[in-house]
Amino acid sequence: MNGQEKASPDLAQGRAGAAVPSGGTVAQRARLYAGLVLFAFILSHFLNHALGNVSLAVMQAGQDLRYEVWSSRPGQILLYGALAVHVVLALIKLARRRTWRMPVWEAAQILLGLSITCLLIKHIVATRLAMDVFHTNVDYRHELTALWDNSVFWQSALLVIVWGHAIIGLHYWLRLRRWYRALRGWLAAAALLVPTLALTGWINAARLLAETGRLGLNNTASERAVLADWMHQGRWGLVVVLGAIALVILARRVADRFGKGFTITYPDGRQVRSRPGPTLLEISRANGLPHLSVCGGRARCSTCRTRILAGGDRLASPSTAERTVLARIRAGNDIRLACQIRPQSDLEIEPMLAGRRDFGKRLQPTDDLYRWGVERAVSVMFVDLRGFTALSEGRLPYDVVFILNRYLDGAGEAIRKAGGLVDKVMGDGIMALFGIDKDARQGARDALQAVLSLAQALERANADLAAQLDTPLRLGIGLHTGPAILGRIGLAGAAGAAAQLTALGDTVNVASRLEGASKDLGGFAVISNSTLEAAGIEGLALAGIGGDSVPATPHAVGLRGRTEPLEVWAVRDPVVLVAALQASEVGGAIGEEVASV
């Protein structure tokens, strides 16, 4: 990588504490904003359904309030304009696809979106067209009557599909934002609760109407016949639109096959033929070549960035969205986003997040993802043996090695038993990772448990080495939780070191600095507030009573590269963590269940 690439180690986050750029082309942003308007309508609609668990009267009162917003002239323009923009741009994007190789989540969102258009036709015709053309009073009694019995399954399916499509889109839009990671457990609970309450609400209200004999429609049989005919025509219209899209895709494939082509040359010398139209990312995917794209090709991250070795002068200039991301990572002029460039002529390229040796094979579903790098929220711990230099003076090398190994054996075992991974040993220091294969909450709780275990291991080591030590061994620990890039780093070839999983990024740097700060703050461990929050622990749970007996104290630590001080707790007596973990144990169990969903 060039110097500019190295200047930005945290791939998706940019500088410490910085927000992820929203990015995206004009069409992508328009589709996103339209989707957010539709989500606001969907959320209000589903919450209104949920009121059916209270009573039909409350349900109707909520509907009347919603109509004041969404049935007003500005509301209708906003809602139906957003619906048209979102659907049309989505269909255009679908028609422009050059390959069907894509992540599972992206395929699921496309299939759910197409299902919505099929199922939504009846709903729109039976409500909005009935109101606008026949002036039907579409109150909840009328709507529930129309849905009860013959449409219960499909209406319920529509509700679940719409919600699933929206949640997938929101998740992959927000997942690189720090605040989203912090609230992910609560948001996951809400994402399950809203559709559940909506389903039970409308079904309970309809069932009650049926049992009390109050079902009834507010339009005539002739009007319903006309509406049914419009539904039929709408479905055929959708078939025509989808058929046209299929023909466009087929025509593109034929044109790609017989049209003028060009060659993409990859780092191992392998060449791939393609035709104008698809993005470089789509070309790589279509040919099974390794090319990362965390955001799904939306110009919201930089993981697909590629160095153009030859032919870059024939590429179109970067769009505003691409320029924003490239400026964010301070990329050189030879770096482009593979998801945004559409080659028209020969190119020689080098994807920045895939090594040369990775291009001799096709990327398989069973490949180790850590080989390419994975962003994940983890807890990083640094452990250092205090005063080891002074301890070593005047001792025989054998004695120094024996003492050091005794300490490292106990510390390593304590970390592993707590669920952590010893990343590396640096002399008398240890770097450990927690939460690699677990959610962030459990990883943070494991790390806090490791602090306790390390204190106990230190006591045992001091007891075993009492005859050889003038003063007991002391530890300093730094612990921080946040996003990091996990990857297997190692030398290639049989003579090289085995590839080792390690963490890179700002979270690692902060944890290391907190370990150093433990000297000045006089704590056995310095733990960031983000670790406590991730573990579900309130900072006040660490506070004791009385001057010197206070087991933990809060501090604001200034760190190089950060404009705002970091809130931390200096823990003098690790036993305080026992009560804090126990107090949050019930909440932790709930959080684990939500996160697992």
Image: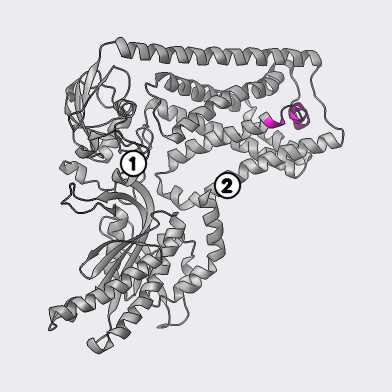
Q: Amino acid at mark 1?
A: Asp
- The picture quadrant where one finds residue 153 is top right
* Rendering quarter of residue 559: bottom left
Under mark 2, the amino acid is Ala
Q: In this figure, which residue is indicated by the disc labeled 1? A: 367
Q: Nearer the viewer, residue 276 or 33?
A: 276
- Mark 2 secondary-structure assignment: helix
Residue closest to the far front? 494
Identity of the residue drawn at 67% across and 20% down: 125
Residue 145 in the image: above or below residue 467: above
Closer to the camera in the image, 437 or 520: 437
Mark closest to the chain's N terminus, 2 or 1: 2
Position of 81 with respect to 382 (left or right) is: right
* Residue 490 coordinates in the image, percent (x, y): 22, 51
**Identity of the residue drawn at 19% across and 25% down:** 312
Start-end of magenta stretch: 140-153
Count of numbered circles on the image: 2
Residue at 48%, 64% in the rendered image: 537
Compared with 280, 444 (above or below) is below
Residue 61 can be seen in this image: no
Q: Secondary structure at mark 1?
A: loop
Q: Position of residue 132 (x, y in %)?
A: 69, 18
Question: Can you identify the residue that label 2 sits on?
Answer: 190
